[in-house]
Amino acid sequence: MEFLYEYGLFLAKAVTFIVSVGIILALVIGASQKNNQEPEGTIDVTKINERYDDIKDRIKSVVYSEEVLKQEVKTAKKKQKLEKKAEKKQQKIAAKESSENDSKESKSKKRVYLLDFDGDIKASAVDNLREEITAVLSLAREEDEVVVRLESAGGMVHSYGLASSQLARIKDKNIPLTVCVDKVAASGGYMMACVANTICAAPFAILGSIGVVAQLPNFHRLLKKNDVDFELFTAGEYKRTLTMFGENTDKGREKFTEDLEVTHELFKDFVSRQRPIVDIDKVATGEIWFGSQAKEQELVDQLTTSDDYIISQVDTAEIYHVQYTTKKSFTERLGMNVQHGVEHSINNILSKLNTSRFM
């Protein structure tokens, strides 16, 4: 018993010491972050053309022989010389026809700005999207293009309404906007996609779900059974139509359904204005379609993956991947690492269960 007492006392001291050190470290880190005057986030720009050229060169170095590689280098040098000559000639012609600034613009390639949007139920990525679009619009020209790789199954109406308005800023500047959907753009996700001049979708991507849904549990009978009263005070007849704990009435349900119908009509009207070629009464049933079916319904314009669409422009345009990134705190990084660890463990368990089921 004396040993257990001593061991317990030692353990308590050790835990107290560790917790104290942890609190001190947290306070020091928090103070250093407060004193840090750096901006919350930064715009990172990567030129995609260089990455594709690097991949191509690596494959050539393995597949081609040395003789073929030498010939490739010679051919590339000749091509560069011809391009430089043609560029100089074009500059001379342009200099005669317009000012020096105009000539610089005329000889420059089309630029494609690539953005990513991975949406959750609250469309949280709209904060980054807003910064990225603001950065792009500061330089983009009407002959350029903005491509958004969009993935979202939808969520809150007001959140995705804001995200759609952010994309509309691009069209308002007369800059072509293309949305590429590789997996899913449904409900609020499609609300965003339909703003684009061109929608590209993979053959098995999920699109549509032009509808509105709301659901909530009601615990009134459970509370009543256990003699628990719930009181709700409101000012305004329809301030609360349905509640989780009070007794819901038919009148309240009718009003709630009416509000859903109004939201649905606004959604339908929005899609109709953005894509007038769509038969809105036919597609606004809440149904979803795979890419090939969505093409038949005029919900998309092209069947292709985002990779193929981007690669098709590598030789003719300068492609820039634009990302707004924020510097995460120590606690945020720690939380993300824990989350990823848990997700990885769960995925491993599910993978093993599926493997055993199909064997």
Image (tube, rainbow, N blue to C red):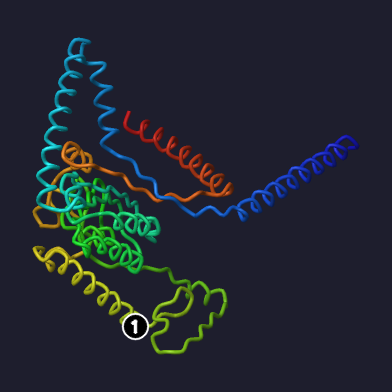
Kindly indicate the quadrant of the structure image that contains residue 161: bottom left
Q: Which residue is drawn at 72% across and 48% down?
A: 24
In the rendering, at what x and y percent does residue 76 appear? 18, 24
Q: Mark 1 points at which residue?
A: 250
Q: Which of 78 and 155 is in front in this view?
A: 78
- Compared to residue 242, the image places residue 8 above or below, namely above
In the rendering, at what x and y percent does residue 84 appear? 16, 32
Please indicate whether residue 16 sits to the left or right of residue 103 in the image: right
**Farthest residue in the bottom direction?**
236
Q: Nearer the viewer, residue 26 or 51?
A: 51
Kindly indicate the quadrant of the structure image that contains residue 93: top left
- Compared to residue 354, the image places residue 250 above or below, namely below
Q: Residue at x 85, y 42 (%)?
A: 9
**Farthest residue in the right direction?**
2
Q: Quadrant of the N terminus?
A: top right
Q: Quadrant of the C terminus?
A: top left
Please indicate whether residue 238 sits to the left or right of residue 36 in the image: left
Number of marks in the image? 1
Please indicate whether residue 205 sits to the left or right of residue 242 in the image: left
In the rendering, at what x and y percent does residue 65 appear? 21, 11
Crowding around mark 1 (Cα neighbors within 10 Å: few <14, some 14 to 19, many 20+) is few
Q: Which of 62 and 303 is in front in this view?
A: 62
Amino acid of disc 1: Asp
Please indicate whether residue 248 sits to the left or right of residue 335 in the image: left
Q: Residue at x 10, y 57 (%)?
A: 297
In the rendering, at what x and y percent does residue 27 appear? 69, 52
Q: Which of 294 and 143 is in front in this view?
A: 143
Kindly indicate the quadrant of the structure image that contains residue 299: bottom left
Considering the numbered disc 1 on the image, is that residue within a helix, a strand or a loop? helix
